[in-house]
Image: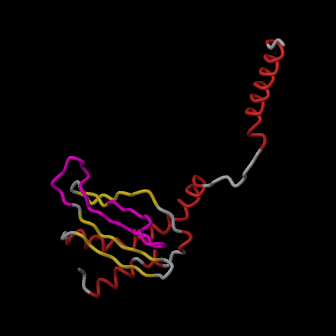
Amino acid sequence: MPDQHSENEIKGALGALTTLSPDLCVPLPPRRISLGEAKECLVQWQPAGAAGEWRLSLTKRSESIDDTDFAPQTFQASIDPANQRARFEQAGSDTPFFAWVGGHLADIAADTRARQAKERVPLMARAQVSSRAFAIWEYIPHIVILIALAAFAYMFAIVHIKF
């Protein structure tokens, strides 16, 4: 675990996300940042389990799906924008990766914040639900078919029923 000095630096780097308005947060599609040597950093921004919390995950992994010997290294930050708090944890022991995270975290957090506004509009458009409960013009084809069936039944009953 990092010492107090680097913990303050990491929380400072996450400042762009802790000051984000909670009602403007939207999940982002995963991004990949190349680390060289056939390794990449997968960046994910998504809601966390607790209400109102968001999670920024940075995972070092192999670019090749065939590399099964590589153990992923993960840095996760839980952000609570409503209370402007951040806590983080690291899984793994890859010191160069966590040093890279410390150096690039402010840029990744700023980019994630900037992408919120761009991704919010299309996401809200996809999620929009119609508020109208009833529109008669949508049911016209159904009404025409029901009238035609009723007319057929009436004509069949008059022509074929003999008293």
Q: Look at the image and tell me in which quarter the C terminus lies.
A: top right
- Classify 143 as above or below 93: above
Left or right, 82 with respect to 94, comes to right
Q: Nearer the viewer, residue 86 or 52?
A: 52
What percent of the width, then of the height, locates residue 49?
Answer: 41, 68
- Classify 48 as above or below 82: above
Residue 42 location, quadrant: bottom left
Q: Nearer the viewer, residue 114 or 157?
A: 157
Q: Nearer the viewer, residue 55 or 66?
A: 55
What percent of the width, then of the height, locates residue 54?
Answer: 44, 70
Q: Look at the image and tell me in which quarter the N terminus lies.
A: bottom left
What percent of the width, then of the height, locates residue 38?
Answer: 23, 54
What percent of the width, then of the height, locates residue 9?
Answer: 34, 82
Residue 78 location, quadrant: bottom left
- Seen at 67% across and 52% down, the residue is 130
Left or right, 5 with respect to 20, comes to left
- Seen at 46% across and 60% down, the residue is 28
Q: Residue furthest left?
A: 69
**Magenta range:** 42-71
Q: Nearer the viewer, residue 60 or 162?
A: 162
